[in-house]
Amino acid sequence: YDVESEKIIGAEALVRWNYKHREMLAPYRFIPYFETDNSIIKVDEVVLHRVCAKLKEWKENGRPLYPVSVNLSQKHLEQPRLVSHLTGIVDSYGVDHALIEFELTESATANNQRYLVFVMNELRKRGFRISMDDFGTGYSSFALLNEMPLDTLKIDKSFVDLITNEEDSNKIQIILRHIISMAREMGVSCVAEGTEEYKQVLTLRELGCEVVQGYYYSKPLPVREFEAKYLK
């Protein structure tokens, strides 16, 4: 959501596992197992295919279109010819590249940064957007700002949570103000994740954060509920 207009400006594709149609599993319960081999690559690609199929459907039905971010795992980033492969998937649905934002976690950038920077630059040349998830949780955060061609920084929920902690609020606001200001000067927008309370939204707006994501505006929704709420 844009914090000034309080209107939706994008979405993130999240994965859940409807395990044997009995239980809906959160990512932390199964993604680590898929990351031990190349299974996570298949998960990434299933999500990208489904997002593109939906964007194509919405366009054909004349519904409003918002950019959707999809995750790229570290295993996926290590694959050869990745850029042409991802581009081919999106193009097979005729989806505008500007509607797809590839989201990386900071931990996924730990290995072979030179190759990663090359991949990110090639994706951006093709009109895709790049975001860095969980920003601020790793030691290399600020070095990444200098090296990586990013469009968006997603400030980790752990920082946002501290806004409502009386003991830590002043200190965390100083940190957030500098992150947001520095990102703006570098031409990178900020998204504050895990925003759940009005005080957090108000503080982030005052600090200059442009976009928030979290339960305050909407919990994660199945696609049909998303369509009913936002794509009328």
Image: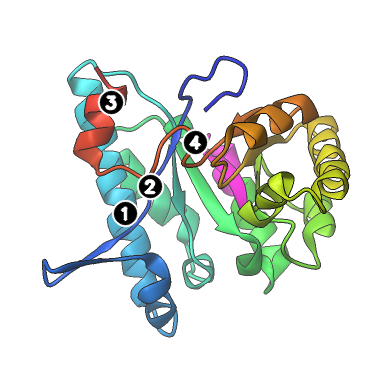
Q: Amino acid at mark 1?
A: Val
Say whether residue 68 is left or right of residue 174: left
The residue that mark 4 highlights is: 216
- Give the vertical position of 5 relative to 23 (above or below): above
Secondary structure beneath disc 3?
helix
Q: Amino acid at mark 2?
A: Ala
The residue that mark 3 highlights is: 229
The residue that mark 2 highlights is: 13
In 3D space, how far apart are the residues under numbered discs 1 and 3 (Cα atoms)?
21 Å
Residue 130 is one of the magenta-drawn residues: yes
Comparing 206 with 28, the one in front is 206
In 3D space, how far apart are the residues under numbered discs 3 and 4 (Cα atoms)?
15 Å
In 3D space, how far apart are the residues under numbered discs 3 and 2 (Cα atoms)?
16 Å
Query: Magenta span covers which residues?
Result: 122-133
User: Nearer the N terminus, badge 3 or badge 4?
Assistant: 4
Say whether residue 85 is left or right of residue 180: left
Secondary structure beneath disc 1?
helix
